[in-house]
Amino acid sequence: MAGVKIADRLDLYATLGLNRSSREMEVKRAYKKSALSNHPDKNKGTETEFLYIGFAYHVLSNAKLRAIYDANEVEFSTSRQSLVDEFNSEKALEIFDAFFGTANPFAALSDGVNGLFDAEEKARQPKPAPQISLPLICTLEDLYNGVKKSASVSKQRLDNEGKIVDYTKTYIIQVESQWISGTKLRYVKEPDDVSGDVVFTVEVERHKTFTVSGFDLKLTHPTPLYNALTGVTIPLEMPDGRTVHVSVEEVIDDKMTKTLTGEGMLNKATNLRGDVIVSFDIKFPRKLNQFQKDLLDMALRCPIELTEETHIQRRLISTACKLPQNLAQTERQKVEAVNALMTKRDEPPVPE
């Protein structure tokens, strides 16, 4: 192969089947295909074609030499005479060897020539860029209402000239009600992107009222003992801004729950919402004075007849509980008269 020389007016782009707008990656692909097809050790390969292919790749894969050739391809052979004169078949084989990892791929190969070259080229390719991992902070309100969130990520890609340039990609993300902390969202990079896939990891912030269980919303309401015994109405501020009321009239114990059907998270599979489930944490008083104990004893152990609305004692007790502190003087005298009458009635009789 030592006697072949480069022609003075060789069209380098045509030799590789390219045009002036071809990028660096396209130059490599064209050389791979042409060099394999025209290698002298293959039946259809010729020494001259192989030399021209090697020279074309040598110039077009070098940004500086390519710029000089593009500026004046007619004068290129003259201005770079030494480059042209020194490029021979041995140099073409060196380029082939550096590209594929062997100068003679046509020795006995179990996987075939193309298999070898594909493996060699794969080994030379840069390793995939590591993924870009970012948190996606969501509130319960975001999940409940199914909002859209946007996230801008700094990335890199190849431009039309094969150069790496910075750019910003904005992802519009539809929030789903079934997400939990740790849910991962992968966005595969585009073909010209060199900065890897983007993976968002969902982080759901703790809510002041609710916890999520499947599609149900749960909460525990701290309930004073008197509300547990007499009933309570609980206003709940929902994640969509509404206020709903949970009314409990029966006596509450610590195992009781109250359910609001259809007020939980949306299940898109069924287009139905889960429930709101209220549990109760009954708060007992730390101490009672004697009068409070007497009232409790009276309330919890009163005879059945005392519960009748017409019973005089019930009427007196009810009236006493409703009396304001700023009674008028005449009203206060009447109350004290009743108290005096009751005290006198309870006094033991005077011995005869």
Image (tube, helix red, strand yellow):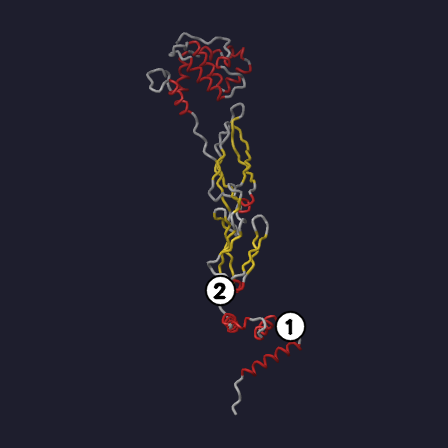
Percent x, y for residue 47?
Answer: 41, 9
247 versus 307 height, above or below = above
Which one is in front, 110 or 271? Answer: 271
Q: Position of residue 172 (x, y in %)?
A: 55, 37
**Pointers 2 and 1 in contact (C-beta within 8 Å):** no
Q: CA distance from mark 2 to mark 1?
A: 31 Å
Please state the horizontal and vertical placement of residue 217, each as a whole percent of the image: 51, 50
In this figure, what is the number of numbered marks?
Answer: 2
In the rendered view, would you say 190 is above or below 64?
below
- Give the amino acid type for the residue marked by disc 2 in the picture: Phe
User: Is residue 232 placed above or below 2 in the rendered structure?
Assistant: below
- Residue situated in front as seen by the camera: 268 or 307: 307
Pick whichever, 26 or 281, lies toward us. 281
Query: Which residue: 34% across, 18% down?
Result: 109
Lateral position of residue 315 relative to residue 111, left or right: right
* Picture layout, residue 193 above or below residue 278: above
The amino acid sitting under disc 1 is: Asn
Mark 2 neighbour density, 10 Å: few (under 14) some (14–19) many (20 or more): few
- Which of the image's four quarters has the N terminus? top left
The picture places residue 189, in percent across and down from the top left corner, at 49, 31
Q: Residue furthest top?
A: 3
Residue wearing tag 1: 326
Q: Which residue is mark 2?
A: 284
* Of pointers 2 and 1, the one earlier in the residue sequence: 2
Q: Helix, strand or loop at disc 1?
A: loop
**Which numbered dot is residue 21?**
none
Front-most of residues 302 and 73: 302
Q: Residues within 10 Å of mark 1 (few under 14, many from 20)?
A: few
Residue lying furthest bottom: 352
Q: Residue at x 64, y 72 (%)?
A: 326
Q: Could you say whether the residue bearing mark 2 is in a helix, strand or loop?
A: loop
